[in-house]
Image: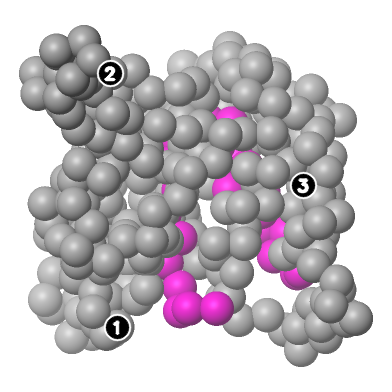
Amino acid sequence: MSNTVESIIHEVKKVICGKDYIIAQTLTAILAGGHILMEDVPGVGKTTMAVAFSKTMGLNFGRVQFTPDVLPSDITGFSMYDKATDQMRYQPGAIFHNLFLADELNRASSRTQSALLEAMEESSVTVDGNTYILPKPFVVFATQNPTGASGTSLLPDSQIDRFMIRISMGYPSSKDEKAMLEQRKNGINPMDNVHTVCNDVILSQMQQEVNNIFIHEKIVDYIIALINKTRGNPDLLRGGSPRATLALTSMSKAYAYMSGRNYVIPSDVQKVFLPVITHRLILTPEAEVNSRRTTDVAKDILKDTFAPKV
């Protein structure tokens, strides 16, 4: 599947300039079967990234622009009376897609945000006591504006932890911004040039191949050691959860797969550690006063943890 991976990246790069690392991490998370949280200021291409991935991977795409008046039933669906059958009939919500874009998720109410919890963990939704299975593969691609921006609220910790990675686009360089303008001159929409190179069946097959990637016991111990060092760290009120251990393992396998290997090496773990762990950590007040960041703590943990040779 290496040609497919390269083709996906090539197609997405047609609309996202100069963000090769972000594109690679996003695809790694999708192959690992995880969900992506992209936090950044408006206008840097978060939504464009999600649309480009859905188009080139041939995924059924759904989108909700989250606002305070979006209801949980808008996401999960609802039961309604069908006069023709004299029975209640389930009307699926917006989440029933392979790739669901939750745009500006942190503008929604806490009640609406919680509607995603079951879907993200179990790939199903429960309405009126009935459980409905979501399409496979299923990926939530959520965007949020930085905390403190107008009209935003913090995502609950239980939801933050369900995102496999958190990434940030950042502003483009002058060179990349010029290339972006070149792509769009004469009214051309570069999204029109993005071609579909696979589909949901092929993606599911790729995800299964990622699951089958070999990981040595020493690498497993290395992953556990990294996560354990986030717990009880003097700069942190809270470290990584067991879900973080699972996410780091899956992302490491997917990164090995992206690199054309059927086994994990320590550098795979190191490459994905920061996007997997930083959003799950909570700094102590003292660390915040000292201008420490979760990224700083995670980098120190990587530096101080012995990497095995396998």
Density class for disc 3 (Cα within 10 Å; few <14, some 14-19, many ≥20) is: some
Residue at 38% over, 61% down? 65
Describe residue 276's horizontal placement relative to residue 168 as left or right: left
First along the sequence among labels 1 and 3: 3
Describe residue 23's horizontal placement relative to residue 230 as left or right: right
Closer-to-camera residue (22/11): 11
Q: Which amino acid does label 3 sit on?
A: Ile
Q: x%, y% of residue 234?
A: 16, 62
Residue at 27% over, 51% down? 160
> Could you tell me which quadrant the N terminus lies in?
top right
Q: Mark 3 points at which residue?
A: 9
Q: Mark 1 points at which residue?
A: 149
Residue at 28% over, 18% down? 132
Q: Does the magenta stretch include residue 176?
A: no
Q: Mark 2 points at which residue?
A: 132
First along the sequence among labels 2 and 3: 3
Q: x%, y% of residue 310?
A: 62, 24
Residue 51 image label? none
The nearer-to-camera label among 1 and 3 is 1
